[in-house]
Image (cartoon, rainbow, N blue to C red):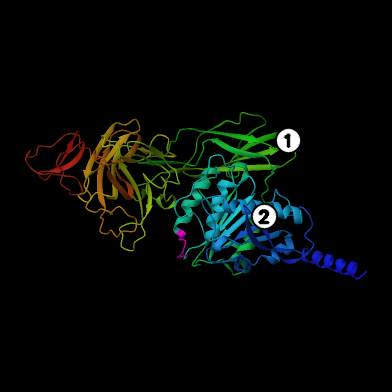
Amino acid sequence: MRKAILCLLLCSLQALSVTAGQISGNITVNGSKRQYIGYLPNNMGNYRPLLISCHGMNQDAAYQKNMLSIESVADTAKFLTIFPEGIDKSWDISGDRDIKFVLAIIDEMEKKYKIDRNFVYLSGFSMGGMFTYHAMNKIADKIAAFAPISGYPMWGTTADAKVRPIPIIHTHGTSDDVVGFSGVQGALNVWIRHNGCPTTAKVEKRYRNAAHITRHTWGPGKNGVEVVLMEMADKGHWISNDNGVKTGDEIWRFCKRYCLVDKNPKVNFTSPQSNLTFVTFGGTSDAASVTLDVEATDPDGQVVSVAYYDGSTLLAEFDKAPYTYQLTGLKKGTHKISAVVTDDEGRTGSNEISIKLLEPTSSSYYPMAQDFKTVENGVPDGWSTYDGQEKRTGVATGFSSGSRVFHFTNSRRAFEWGLYTRNVTGTPKAGYARFGDEGCTSTLTFYPGRYQLAYKVCNWNQPNFSPVTIAVETIDGQEVCSEVFTPEVNVGNAADKAFATIYNQYFVFDIQEKGRYVITFYTADAPWADLVIGQSNLYYKGANTGITEVQAADEDAPCYNLSGMPVAEPKAGIYIKGGKKVIFK
């Protein structure tokens, strides 16, 4: 009898231990006993979500649980939270050791608490955030959404082409001195592109009335997923829980929208595949018509209609495929073009692209380098590069070598971001960085007139300096004019080296015929010649001067370009020779 009472008491205590509050346990994975702790809400019920949250390096599960402080929202929303213990207080961020641990946790939680495997989410702080990015390529079929905090792969981010589009919310402080905020955008860009999200974010400042938070949202992309950055101004390397906004609450608010089994209809642009920018100098934009087309699907029914909108204005609606529409007559400005799909159950899905028509005047300019800071370790929007072996067209990200944008971190620097390219083979014109190239999402249209390019260029690893040719060319590759500039600064083959006093150079040129043009920066025609572009601003200076012939001038007189720099072998363009303006054709 006493044994029966004792057995009943023990069973009751075990029941209480899984009813509410902190839980703990261990799982044997590949012969190693692994530990975890967690929080189980009161009366959670069956088939509820699971959030797995990984600690930082040299921290532990208890510390992560205390910092995330998610109990109150878990009690309300009824989801289970598990905090795993890393081996030696760290995580395997390149192999499968801890990937298998996470999968074992999911199996264990389904067995013990009957969680719903379609609603499993993974988060982590610092090194745990790096592990979260690692898991994106490994187990995206097991995790419905990912939520890294203050961590990303500092050696470069990649997205496996076989991985499904995945929702991501990344939280990071701008004053983080351990895992720098400057690298967040480059990591996210890889997944923004992979997910088919718009490359321009929706920005919400003072998010939820918190002055220090700016929320950036890219999406929806394929399958309706979004990528979100929670930018925490002046916050360091910690989990932010102040001003009425808690990181754990925001992670849950985002993740709860996603499930591995999604019944909402999906729509994705197949034309154009990304945002477009048409830049027209000296006249009115007359962009060619843009073909709109999408793929629309419904996982559990039928697509009833697809509608296109310019802002809130309905452009066209289709009740069957193909959903092709020719968009014409766009005026100057930014147009948000959205596609909305509706299924036979009344559910909707949407996607959006941006089309910009810009008309810089003589009182303004177009900053061709403005997107450098958004694509660290990548090629920015509007640019293409070639090094004699590989051509890269922006936006392209995730590179650890070759032509790409560097973030220069030393305090003594002439610019912060630079686009690097090289000539691997030494073949003539085999190394370049070009703006407005065929296949790029940005185009340059010039009306007849005078133009000025202001640029800052240096060498990357050329101690004796290597000349750079700046050329204006037609879209089919015909050179209009060019000039050669030899840098006087060499970065030193390392992004953390100091380099200063790089002055603006000015290339003035005339355009005689309206057309589409490109601006190209060529390396020297020598093996491993290189260049780094730190600034490139294009100005429209007004109508042509009317000079059409070379004026009489002393043939032996020195020749200068219009910024006063000596020119040994002038090409087509206007120069100063013998104190007179002359034109070489």
- Label 1, residues with CA under 10 Å away: few <14, some 14-19, many ≥20: few
Q: Amino acid at mark 2?
A: Ile
User: Label 2's element?
Assistant: helix
> How many marks do you count on the picture?
2
> Residue 503 in the image: x percent, y percent?
25, 55
> Residue 114 in the image: x percent, y percent?
76, 53
Region in magenta: 176-181
Q: Is residue 484 magenta?
A: no
Q: Is residue 228 visible?
A: no
> Residue 48 in the image: x percent, y percent?
74, 54
**Quadrant (top left/top right/bottom left/bottom right) for the N terminus:** bottom right
Q: Is residue 137 above or below residue 75?
A: above
The residue wearing badge 1 is 301
The tag on residue 471 is none
Identified at 69% across, 34% down, the residue is: 303
Task: Pick whichever, 452 or 285, lies toward us.
Answer: 452
User: Label 1's element?
Assistant: loop
Q: Amino acid at mark 1?
A: Gly
The tag on residue 105 is 2
> Residue 37 in the image: x percent, y percent?
67, 64
